[in-house]
């Protein structure tokens, strides 16, 4: 009699014992159908079990997960303290009736001729043939061509390729390029229908699909004979799943899986993450630099404007915009009309009752809105305390759009989350920019990602400081990445200009962005990380305690901190989170710093699955931010 341990996707933190029928051969990673409660369910075998009297029989052996996929799942369970059930639920496709199977097939384009630099990078990757390569290539240096040439060789050897992009929105254009070039390729991400996901999932398992372009969940696909993983824009924090469990970083998992299979992993970015660049400096990763822009393109000139001496939308700025040939992109990191509503007479500030942060005035919708929890109330313009007129004095994208419309009178679309739901969609804006019917575009981060914009003559960063001042150790890194990305929008074809407005013109992040100097930024940043003991010099864990009763939250946080003292980690807190309240719940956190990951895991694993009454507990390893 053989018994196996099985995890199922609905009881995520438990495992169950089943009997194996005679003649059925199961192993770790076998996907099975088992009786569960009064029904039947699909589960994954995670190992042998001790005999257990009341066990029922496994009903059906469906297929086996490839060994590397199973090991990758184990890695997530151990390294991110994830529940086995939730990890396998995430890795397996939704099980539906298998739809008719049709994969894309088209004609192939011939490859571009590589520059010297690109050639060197391709040759190096192919020669070494395994390990992690960090391609640091400035905007427009042709990283994609390097990926493609390596892919070509790998595919020729009959192996398959995983190509990851940080956001679902970037999949279509990447897939289009891949298909044009290789005549095939499929996409995989959470926005596909269950049927489509199943098609691609089993298509890779069966070896019918050898190229997949996907967002982070694609890193778990059961590709047959995987020969290469590309992680484009490796610095992008969207690779980190942090809004829901299981928490994990698709980039780090790609690196793990690459090592497991002894295949090359290419991380590419114009602004590598500090962590990855540090690893490259230390020799863990191999650094490949692309320093030249393809063709005639030059890096744009960057001008820094001191906001202590000038208004946000000054006359000088208006003149600049008027004088530009080509398109103008205006970037501001705040949605809405006025991110702050205040009464100058009595000091009343319009705040979210649940989150304790200022509400944003959205003029088009006529509401005050909380950007944390979506709390909404109808807008008004007199102070509810003293009756004085309220001031809508701060500036968001909606206000900028209105102001520019008054001045230029042209169709000026806005690209942010509020605007895109209605009105012009992404694609229409791009075609408008292309055919010239749109000249000026206002937007949030959205304008920094996605398609290549044609003929951009000027990029304006209205206020560079909104992220820089976040109480978060990655604020400098984020700002540098963002500024570089926005600046990269200028002068893809010809030489364009960039204006960065800031209250801190002397800050090293701003200076480095002006010079397009990643190295300058990195040297300062790594010094700061070392001095203040942040990653990559230490490993972080974080416990967030949330609850409606402040005293209870404080008590539980203190209790947990007390328990954590027994482990070899340094503790910060418990203290109130920078975001003090969210959706009506008070928030306290404890930060753990450890010399290695094991110490953090050891300290935090007893908390997994632990429950405190009326408390929501979030336990995270490698937290993305500390807000
Ligand atoms: Zn808003
Ligand atoms: Zn008032
Ligand atoms: Zn709120």
Image (cartoon, helix red, strand yellow):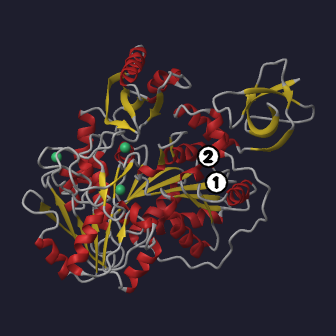
Q: Residue 592, labelled with which disc?
A: none
Q: Position of residue 408 (x, y in %)?
A: 23, 80
Label 1, residues with CA under 10 Å away: few <14, some 14-19, many ≥20: many
Query: Who's the residue at 85% across and 36% down the image?
Result: 25
**The image quarter in which residue 82 lies:** top right
Q: Within 8 Å of ligand 1, the CB of disc 1?
A: no
Q: Position of residue 533 (x, y in %)?
A: 29, 32
Measured Cα–Cα span from mark 2 to mark 1: 8 Å
Label 1: which residue?
A: 226
Question: Is residue 2 shown left or right of residue 335?
Answer: right
Q: Position of residue 211 (x, y in %)?
A: 63, 62
Quadrant showing the N terminus: top right
Q: Position of residue 401 (x, y in %)?
A: 28, 70
Whether residue 141 is visible, yes or no, is yes
Judge by depth and name the residue closer to the eye, 371 or 292. Answer: 371
Quadrant showing the C terminus: top left
Judge by depth and name the residue closer to the eye, 452 or 469. Answer: 469
Secondary structure, mark 1, is strand
Label 2, residues with CA under 10 Å away: few <14, some 14-19, many ≥20: some
Judge by depth and name the residue closer to the eye, 419 or 624. Answer: 419
Secondary structure, mark 2, is helix
**The image quarter in which residue 297 lies:** bottom left
Label 2: which residue?
A: 261
Asked if the residue at tag 1 contacts the one at tag 2, i.e. Cβ–Cβ closer than 8 Å, the answer is yes
**Mark earlier in primary sequence (2, 1):** 1
Whether residue 497 is visible, yes or no, is no
Q: Is residue 460 above or below residue 287?
A: below
Query: Who's the residue at 85% across and 33% down the image?
Result: 58
Question: Is residue 159 shown left or right of residue 524?
Answer: right
């Amino acid at each position: 009699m053989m018994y196996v341990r099985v995890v199922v996707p609905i009881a995520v933190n438990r495992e169950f014992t089943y009997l194996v029928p005679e003649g059925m051969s199961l192993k770790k990673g076998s996907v099975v159908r088992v009786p569960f409660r009064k029904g039947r369910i699909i589960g994954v075998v995670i190992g042998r079990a001790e005999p257990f009297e009341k066990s029922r029989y496994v009903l059906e052996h469906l297929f086996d997960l490839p060994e590397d996929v199973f090991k990758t799942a184990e890695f997530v369970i151990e390294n991110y303290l994830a529940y086995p059930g939730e990890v396998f639920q995430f890795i397996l496709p939704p099980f539906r009736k298998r739809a008719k199977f049709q994969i894309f097939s088209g004609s192939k384009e011939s490859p571009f001729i590589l520059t010297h630099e690109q050639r060197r990078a391709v040759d190096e990757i192919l020669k070494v043939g395994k390990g992690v390569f960090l391609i640091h290539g400035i905007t427009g240096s042709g990283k994609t061509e390097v990926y493609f040439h390596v892919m070509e060789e790998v595919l020729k050897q009959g192996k398959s390729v995983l190509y990851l992009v940080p956001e679902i929105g970037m999949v279509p254009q990447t897939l289009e390029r891949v298909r044009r070039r290789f005549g095939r390729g499929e996409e995989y991400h959470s926005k596909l229908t269950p049927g489509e996901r199943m098609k691609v999932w089993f298509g890779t398992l069966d070896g019918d699909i050898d190229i997949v372009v996907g967002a982070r969940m694609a890193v778990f696909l059961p590709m047959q004979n995987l020969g290469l993983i590309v992680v484009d824009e490796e610095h992008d924090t969207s690779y980190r799943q942090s809004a829901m469990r299981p928490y994990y970083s698709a980039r780090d998992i790609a690196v793990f899986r690459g090592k497991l299979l002894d295949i090359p992993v290419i991380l590419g970015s114009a602004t590598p993450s500090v962590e990855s660049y540090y690893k490259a400096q230390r020799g863990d990763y191999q650094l490949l630099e692309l320093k030249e822009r393809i063709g005639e393109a030059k890096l744009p000139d960057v001008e820094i404007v001191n906001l202590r001496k000038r208004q946000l939308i000054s006359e000088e700025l208006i003149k600049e915009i008027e004088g530009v040939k080509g398109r103008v992109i205006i970037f501001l990191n705040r949605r809405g009309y006025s991110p702050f509503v205040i009464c100058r007479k009595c000091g009343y500030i319009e705040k979210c009752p649940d989150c304790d942060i200022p509400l944003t005035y959205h003029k088009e919708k006529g509401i005050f809105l909380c950007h944390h929890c979506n709390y909404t109330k109808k807008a008004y313009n007199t102070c509810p305390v003293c009756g004085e007129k309220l001031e809508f004095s701060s500036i968001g994208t909606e206000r900028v759009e209105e102001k520019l419309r008054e001045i230029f009178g042209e169709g000026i679309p806005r690209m942010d989350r509020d605007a895109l739901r209605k009105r012009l969609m992404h694609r229409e804006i791009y075609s408008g920019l292309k055919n010239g019917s749109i000249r000026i575009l206002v937007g949030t981060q959205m304008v920094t990602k996605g398609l290549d914009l044609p003929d951009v003559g000027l990029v304006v960063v209205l206020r560079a400081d909104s992220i820089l001042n976040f109480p978060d150790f990655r604020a400098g890194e984020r700002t540098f990445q963002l500024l570089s990305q926005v600046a990269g929008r200028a002068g893809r074809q010809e030489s364009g200009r960039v204006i960065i407005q800031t209250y801190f013109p002397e800050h090293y992040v701003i200076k480095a962005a002006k010079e397009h100097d990643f190295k300058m930024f990195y040297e300062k940043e790594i010094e700061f990380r070392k001095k203040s003991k942040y990653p990559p010099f230490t490993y972080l864990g974080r416990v967030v305690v949330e609850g409606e009763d402040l005293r209870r939250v404080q008590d539980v946080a203190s209790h947990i901190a007390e328990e954590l003292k027994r482990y070899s980690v340094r503790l910060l807190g418990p203290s109130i989170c920078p975001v003090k309240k969210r959706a009506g719940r008070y928030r306290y956190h404890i930060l753990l710093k450890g010399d290695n990951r094991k110490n953090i895991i050891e300290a935090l694993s007893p908390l997994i699955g632990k429950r405190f009454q009326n408390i929501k507990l979030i336990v995270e390893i490698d937290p993305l931010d500390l807000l």
